[in-house]
Amino acid sequence: MKIKEIYNLYTKHYLVDTDTRKIRKNTLFFALKGENFNGNKFALKAIELGASFAIIDEEEYKTHDNIILVDNVLKTLQELANYHRKKLNATIIGLTGSNGKTTTKELINAILSKKYKTSATIGNLNNHIGVPLTLLSMDTNTEIGIVEMGANHQKEIEFLCSICEPDFGYITNFGKAHLEGFGGIEGVIKGKCELYDYLQKNNKTAFVNPKDNIQVEKTKKIKTIPFKDDIKLKEVNPFVKLSFNSVIITSNLIGKYNYTNITISCTIGKFFKVSDIDIKEAIENYTPDNNRSQIIIKSTNKIILDAYNANPSSMRAAIENFYQIEGENKTVILGDMFELGKSSLTEHQNIVEYVESLNFKNTYFVGEIFAKTNLNKNIFKTYNALQEHLKNNPLKHQSILIKGSRGMQLERVLHLFN
């Protein structure tokens, strides 16, 4: 079956699913495959649960008239998403970068939704599957779509751009993330700048932070819209407070690094003619969740939970911010950073030395990589070892920063502070 025919089926309900545990009535089910699963096996179940059609690529599972056989399910999903993108009248904003993508995406969506019918990437579904699903979640009423694009290798952003075809693009920053896959920081810059390459080739526009020399240098041949220069940082203690025009905004976001995320969001809001009051309301009503810079009170402890992910750039920024905010009895609990390749031990050692220089009251380092650094105290090779220590030596009346890569799941320590 050709993409046009599958698209005609899709437009009857504008629904696509890939998981029979979350199947919706009248959806198109795409039987994706992975190392440990084969969606083809669940095609018939999807039909029985209410899917209108199921798309498969293994002939033995074509056991129903509404099961459609294609050469490659994933490729078909991606082609369908791009076909749909071409049919949409929506303006698409593409977003990538090493740190802050999801928060920035959420802020932009909160602001633009004040005036427009928007649709944005859910959570961090930002890869070769997530981007197609994001596009296919948009319908004919969508006016602006915000598409987050993640990558850990070169050529991935280029491919995602070919699917979502952004009209505007923004790169949050170039940090030490996924160094193993990108082959070092220069590889990170090259990989992220594939968004700029697309914008230049297709005569589209980039939003640019004029204080980021890499952004400025890499966008010399592209149409650009710079950050608004009348957005001023007032304080960060612990929340980011800023002003622009005659409006004062007090956000629920911590860390000076979030000032940049708020600034680009305000810039995009003003470009699309959202009022100052609506921008203020959108930002002040946005509260981070999902282990991203959340402030949590547990018994006598005040906790900054930033355990969604970590790399050397975001780790250092979080520690620096934590050091600068007011408060006594500060404790840091840091977990391993993953996907750093050959520089992994060096980057962990750098973090250890930086933390040591700040003289926090308590420091705890967790994970097999931190355990290899030149530090003799408060090193815990496993989470269970840390947990046992904290049970026997409970923390009370502390300000606590919890930061680590997703695989460390450091949010598990929260129950120890009740």
Image (tube, rainbow, N blue to C red):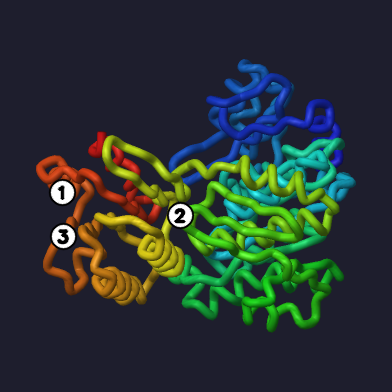
Name the residue at the front extreme: 246
Q: Name which residue lies at 21% across and 60% down.
A: 361
Task: Specify the quadrant of the image occupied by residue 67.
Answer: top right
Residue 263 lies in what quarter of the image?
bottom right
Of residues 273 and 138, the one nearer the viewer is: 273
Residue 50 on image: x %, y %: 67, 17
Which residue is nearer to you in this view: 17 or 354?
354
Identified by mark 3, the residue type is Asn
According to the picture, the residue beneath numbered tag 3 turns out to be 378
Nearer to us in this view, 131 or 312:
312
Which residue in the structure is indicated by mark 1? 385
Q: Amino acid at mark 1?
A: Ala
- Number of numbered discs overlaid on the protein picture: 3
Q: Which residue is mark 2?
A: 238
Q: Are marks 1 and 3 in contact (CB under 8 Å)?
A: no
Is residue 153 visible to the viewer in this orientation of the structure? Answer: yes
**Residue at image coords 54%, 73%:** 188
Drawn side of residue 9 relative to residue 296, left or right:
right
Name the element at disc 1.
helix
Residue 81 in sight in this render: no
Q: Report how far apart the C-alphas of labels 1 and 2 lie in the structure.
A: 31 Å
Q: Secondary structure at mark 2?
A: loop
Above or below, 73 against 212 in this view is above
Q: State which tag comes first along the sequence, 1 or 3.
A: 3
Q: Earlier in the sequence, mark 1 or mark 2?
A: 2
* Residue 80 falls left or right of residue 96: right
The amino acid at mark 2 is Pro
Disc 1: CA contacts within 10 A as few (<14), some (14-19) or many (>=20):
few
Q: Is residue 323 above or below residue 128?
A: below
